Image (spheres, helix red, strand yellow):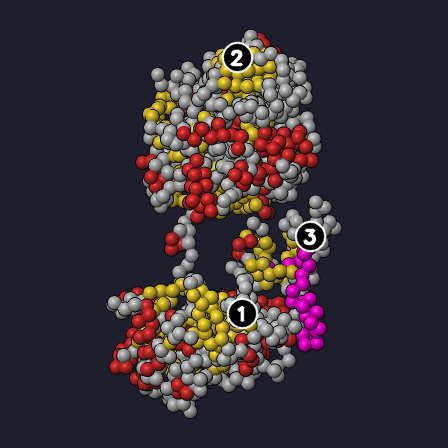
Amino acid sequence: MTQAFRTTSGGRIDRRKAINFTFNGQSYIGYEGDTLASALLANGVHLLGRSFKYHRPRGIVAAGAEEPNSMVQLGEGATTEPNIRATQISLYEGLTASSVNVWPNVEFDISAINGLFAKIMTAGFYNKTFMWPRSMWMKLYEPVIRRAAGWGKAPTQTDPDIYDHMHLHVEVMVVGGGPAGLMAALAAGRAGARVLLVDEQSEFGGSLLSKKRQIGAKDEAGWIADMAAELEAMPDVTLLSRSTAFGYYDHNYLCVLEQKTDHLPAAERKGKVRQRVWHIRAGQVVLATGAHERPLVFADNDRPGIMLAGSVQTYVNRYGVLPGKKMVLFTNNDAAYEAAIDLQAAGGDVVAIIDCRHEVSGELVDAARALDIEILAGYAITGTSGGKRVESVEVRAIQKGAKVYTSAARQIDCDLVAMSGGWSPVVHLFSQSQGQLEYDEEKVCFLPGKPRQAQQVAGALAGQFTLKECLAGGYKAGADAARATGFTPKRKPAAPEIEEPDLGGIEPFWIVPGSRPIGEGMAKHFVDLQNDTTAADIELAVREGFESVEHIKRYTLTGFGTDQGKTSNINALAILSGILDKPIPKVGTTTFRPPYTPVSYGALAGRNLGDWSDPVRVTSIHDWHVENGALFENVGQWKRPWYFPKAGETMHEALNRECLAVRNAVGVLDASTLGKIDIRGPDAAEFLNRIYTNAWAKLGIGRVRYGLMCHEDGMVFDDGTTARLAEDRFLMTTTTGGAASVLDWLEEYLQTEWPELKVYCTSVTEQWATVSIAGPKAGAVLKKLAPEMDLSHENFPFLSFKEGTVAGLKARVFRISFTGELSYEINVPWANGLALWEAVMAAGAEFDITPYGTESMHILRAEKGFIIVGQETDGTTTPQDLGMDWIVSKKKPDFIGKRSFTRSDTARPDRKQLVGLLTETPDDVLPEGAQLVFDPNVPKPIPMAGHVTSSYYSAALGRSIALALVKGGHGRKGQKIFAPLEGKTVTAEIVDPVLYDKEGERLNG
Amino acid sequence: MLNIDCPWCGKRHETEFHYGGEAHIARPEDPAKLEDTEWAEFLFMRTNTKGYFAERWLHSHGCRRWFNVIRNTVTHDIVGSYKMGEKPPKLPKRTGDAK
């Protein structure tokens, strides 16, 4: 029979709309308005999974976000999601779900044998058991643990769903759409504020959805509908249901996950945004996040069918489901009696109420008595039995403070245990916002204390546990929030007449001893159901020396996992407080961190996927490179041609060909990515004088100079050439990767240190495309393209530039060289880059002009001993370390970095200094980054002498070359140095870094 | 995420800004005259303030201007922001949490 546990009437489900779904391969029917959990319970399914460590059968415990057990694998294929709480899955046609952490299946799980070895699987067992031998970790322990533990399976295909992000500014944001939150939104909305109300559930109403209440002339459903209707009619109020505020950050910045289509059948989701992350900045935040019920900790309190009392009430009233037909209630408070009364009224049978308090009285207690429910006051459940479902409980009379109960046990048969240990306000977001918690002895819970942000609290979160208090507290919080953001609240409406039972009392009761001391025998007192942490684990942790609640958490795993200990944290620290004999406030809570409930990576990424995850920058010549077979290298966000292999060529062969073309004829490089900064103003020369290590004041117009930039600590951070375009105007080039940070650096000094200098900096990197031609035939190629331009060495010397026309395009031509060859860098407006490149290729064809990429550029410059910032330097390298004293002015009184060159550390003779290396065997190419030692035969650890910074095979020299930073390297030329590599040690000679054309004769072609 | 009041643009999310460390540390007029220890003081030493702290921010994804902010390093409470060269606003009496 289907839905055998559905009540005959009532609930917020639509009994006319049947919904088919599948769980663990079995087909079931539920109703619209069900969650997966309520639909399974309606069909009598309690066994949903196996526990984390002991693989004990586990079922549904709660009805909302606090659920620790009932995680399922939802959906199949690319859209499958692991570890989703069945209590938060809205049922939809065709839903498919299965248990997690079971093998081979939930009914027969082979790892349940772990339960027999429970003694060795206590707190910290991973740390203890699998430490030794270390070699076994990778081979044996980890794979076995991974199979046995862990929960669901991550999808292996790309997520096909669409996610997006939305930003919103409001005066008042209300979190929680229960009675308090609705009233707060109403008060703020009526005052005229822009209001956002978010609630994680499928509809507003919060706790009212689970209870029967008369509010004025309306029942609870009517009241909720009226509230929602008034709020919806307000133009400046935004209502979001199925929306969880998962993070509360500084200055009232909150993130909300809205689940837009997760409740729809697959066919209706197509093309729609699945989830949206809202980024909210609120003037005031009203937290009305409610409270979670606490379980009681007793022996074998984890069997399927043992649930929270309030959740039982939710299933009965909201979903029309009897989670059991013979219920035992176990409680330390009056409020939970209502669950028993409601279950009985819906057709269930409450066989007994076990109340651990010795004296019980009050309205709800009387009501239960009137129903002829047996109440056992001063009793506790000291054991349970049943396999895949609870079948009976063992109850005993208890004495206060006893460690073991010896009174006679009574067995009570049942199929459902409802338990209530009191209520814990959902302080998660409040704590994330850095508010302090205060322990309330009377209400037996932590409550929000002083807030740190512009914020109000209301409802059960604020300890307002009756509906009457919630409505009043909610309205006040909303009105206060509106007032604080500059609005005038309307007069408070008259409080409606509310019919609700007296709240009654509560007595703290944190752990129920059994017939044997806790930890002895097979019985387990679970504190954290998701992580299988028991009270004995906490005791053991204390015996082993852990006392801080944060340490206990990490050692016992209490509070970890997808539920973050919503039902376990307070019980754990109360038990800890008992063991340490320290009051609860002194023990303190662990830190609450975002997210409140899990958020998928897809939602966090939004649309920032693939090409949108990071900008890709390409030059105006990029398409040509692609068409001509270039392989690319990422330099920052830029794509630069790495090299241009011809068909059948190895990388080595291609590089040799490219390099030899430059040395023997002519090569062409796309240098457009180099950073370019236009620097203007009457003080521009003075500014450069302070920024660069060398002198700039006397640089002639039309001339170019190379410069090094250091930070104040004297370490090189960028280099490049700068041309003087006019008396008050320079064009600076920077490294490709350093362009943005150099501009930042210049602007920082202009704004903060030298605001008196009249200088403006403008990035022009993407205004100019740069084509560099290099090699003995470079002049001949340029002559063909710019017949009007005087290329004679007298009129166009090295380190100068000309403006003119190249290939019919307006151009600036710089005669500079990074290869050591005669070289021209032709700059044309960005859009003309490809036209120039093609003209250069055509003009160079007769000289077999060869395009080359960054790798050949690196080889060519290394042959000349030219540095690359970030390769030969690492932020600890001075110009002197690089042997570049020649570029450091001795005359200038000050420039950035100068003072640091004489610090004792920078003046040390044994600093790592730049040298060249020639390996003893010419074909040995050292790996870049290889460590170097002076003597490989001394006992280990061998003192380090330095490392290889650049290393290549040089076709021009017919052998390998390398650059290295070596301790005291400048004084060690001619000495041997060793690179101990895996399997061999390479011997090299320390030489001058300039290995090709030492005299620089090739610069003139 | 901090809500930072740029003196030119108004309040913007922290993600538009870059942090620039402690404010009001002027580059010495004549570094050559300083002893190594004095230069090291300028170069490396910063206060590690618990409480209200004057710090520099750059509106890097906005107007690209540097300015100063007074922020409580414990509570992240921002008292105000002011342009380079201006005097800082008056600090609240309590300089941090006694936590």
Q: Does residue A857 appear in the picture of this structure?
A: no
Amino acid type at circle 1 is: Ala
Provide the residue designation for mark 2: A412
State the quadrant of the N terminus of chain A. top left
Residue for point 33% across, 80% down: A666
Regarding mark 1 in the picture, which secondary structure is present there? loop
Q: Nearer the viewer, residue A794 or A834?
A: A794
Q: Nearer the viewer, mark 2 or mark 3?
A: 2
Q: CA distance from mark 3 to mark 1?
A: 42 Å
Residue for point 51% across, 59% down: B61
Residue for point 57% across, 45% down: A249
Using residue A286 as the reference point, say whether residue A94 is left or right of it. Answer: left
Amino acid type at circle 2 is: Ile
Q: Quadrant of residue A442?
A: top right
Q: Is residue A902 magenta?
A: no
Provide the residue designation for mark 1: A945
Amino acid type at circle 3 is: Lys
Magenta part of the chain? B29-57
Q: Is residue A268 above or below residue A944?
A: above
Label 2: few (<14), some (14–19) or many (≥20) C-alpha neighbours in 10 Å:
some
State the quadrant of the C terminus of chain A. bottom left
Provide the residue designation for mark 3: B50
Q: Position of residue A265 (x, y in %)?
A: 34, 33
Q: Nearer the viewer, residue A556 or A373?
A: A556
